Amino acid sequence: MTEEVEYQRFKDTLRARFNRYTIKAYHTLPVLDRPFILDIGCGSGVPALELARLSNGQILGLDIDQSALDRFTKCIEEAGLSDRVKTMRRSMVDMDFADESFDVIWAEGSIAAIGFIRGLKEWRRFLKPGGFLAVHDEEGNLEEKLAQITDCGYELLDHFVLDSEIWWTEMYAPLEKHINDIRAQSGSTGVLPEAAEDQRFIEIFKKNPRRYSSVFCIIKKV
């Protein structure tokens, strides 16, 4: 196993700590009978695999990063879920699904790529009548976002905040320790490019942690 793969797997173990919030958000929904779920920006598929277990439905994970999708595909096979979980390499700005294709659209950390209101507007047509959208986004401008949910033709079912302390404790503190351990073990100041980029973000986070709280919004198409 290469250092890059080991590092990515470690990050996935940290990402899996947030599955408790994926579970909390999913349990906000009514009981659904094997729903068809589109996970936009699925990455290596940590939340998508949890959704497969929770829903017993069909999951389509969409992302533009082929290396992440390759890792996801391997995890699907290892979990024995190839019959229910599929991947697609596609940009979220280039989706051409038929209208009303999905029971649920899931987007953890991805809607920021196009903006909250644009995502709400553009993704709505892909939901079946009465379908659901779960979005995990930065907390900034929360009151404005909650108003936009109604304006865009949805009903807010619930929302909850993950404050910066959660992000620090669950993600960035252990990630920083892991990066420092890599440096110590290698006997060098250099680290993998991805780890160096992560460390730069961690330093930014520490300077202004309040900026990095996030919010889960669970909404229904009306």
Image: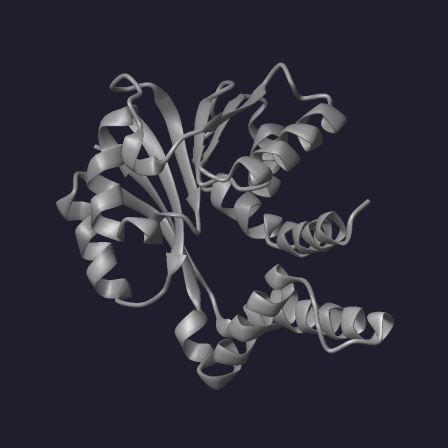
State left or right for residue 204 relative to residue 170: left
Displayed quadrant of residue 96:
top left
Quadrant that contains the C terminus: top left
Percent position (x, y) of residue 94? 29, 31
Coloring scheme of the render? one colour
Q: Residue at x 77, y 73 (%)?
A: 183
Percent position (x, y) of residue 43? 53, 42
Image height check: is 68 above or below 59?
Answer: below
Q: Residue at x 41, y 43 (%)?
A: 107
Image height check: is 211 above or below 12?
Answer: below
Quadrant that contains the N terminus: top right
Percent position (x, y) of residue 140? 31, 68
Displayed quadrant of residue 3:
bottom right
Total marks shown come to 0
Image height check: is 129 above or below 178?
Answer: above
Q: Residue at x 31, y 28 (%)?
A: 95
Q: Nearer the viewer, residue 213 or 199?
A: 199
Examine the rendering and report whether any part of residue 221 can be seen: no
State left or right for residue 58 relative to residue 40: right
Q: Nearer the viewer, residue 133 or 121?
A: 121
Q: Residue furthest left?
A: 151
State left or right for residue 147 relative to residue 107: left
Q: Residue at x 58, y 40 (%)?
A: 68
Percent position (x, y) of residue 87? 52, 26
